Amino acid sequence: MSDPHCLDNEPGTESVYHKHVKARQEFIERNLTGQLLIKSTDRKWDITRQGRVKHYLYPNVFCDTALQEWQVFLQDVQTHSGMHRHQGALAIYVLEGRGYTLIDGKRHDWKQGDLILLPLRPNGVEHQHFNAEPGAGCLWIAFIFMPMYDQVASYTEQIENSPLYDGR
């Protein structure tokens, strides 16, 4: 099985050191020449276990952007998201609407312009997002710095699916 994060080290191929240098050069080149503007029309909405989501940046999925270590996505909270748990370490900025987030069972109300922080916790942070006015727009954008996420060995445990998710 080939892992896109691993350098191929078959006998007779380039040395590991050479592959490392080449990978670093490619990383720097992508930072210098990668796409600097991602238009909304460049990405599509997906229905996931968490609800209606549009990813703008996602390491190893979108490989043409200057920034490579961020996950950035929009969530359209129509009624409520799915519920899941992971280590946290992300920031969510509310673009439109008002609602609340349950973080480890405690309710936190928010509105347009607010910033929701999911703290870094060893056993994870259980959370779910709700639109306080279903039918009205409710949109936020999340930012995850993947090196931090990776270093804490973050996992995702789905607890409840979004009502939009049909299992596909």
Image (cartoon, rainbow, N blue to C red):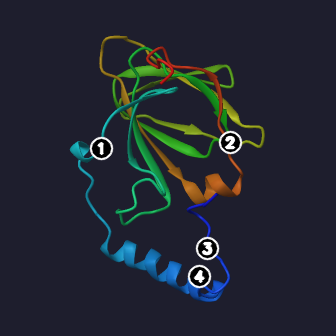
**Of callouts 1 and 3, the N-terminal one:** 3
Question: Please, what secondary structure does the residue beneath circle 2 have?
Answer: loop
**Of callouts 1 and 4, the N-terminal one:** 4
Q: What amino acid is at disc 1?
A: Arg
Q: Nearer the viewer, mark 3 or mark 2?
A: 3
Where residue 115 appears, x then y in whole percent? 46, 38
**Of callouts 1 and 2, the N-terminal one:** 1
Q: In the image as oriented, which residue stretches furthest toward the front?
A: 12
Q: How busy is the neighbourhood of tag 4: few (under 14 within 10 Å), some, or many (20 plus)?
A: few
> Which residue in the structure is indicated by mark 3?
8
Question: Cα distance, mark 3 to mark 4?
Answer: 11 Å
**Of callouts 2 and 4, the N-terminal one:** 4
Question: Cα distance, mark 2 to mark 4?
Answer: 27 Å
Where residue 83 appears, x then y in whole percent? 59, 23
What residue lies at 40% left-to-right and 61% top-to-bottom? 63
> Which residue in the structure is indicated by mark 1?
43
Q: What amino acid is at disc 3?
A: Asp
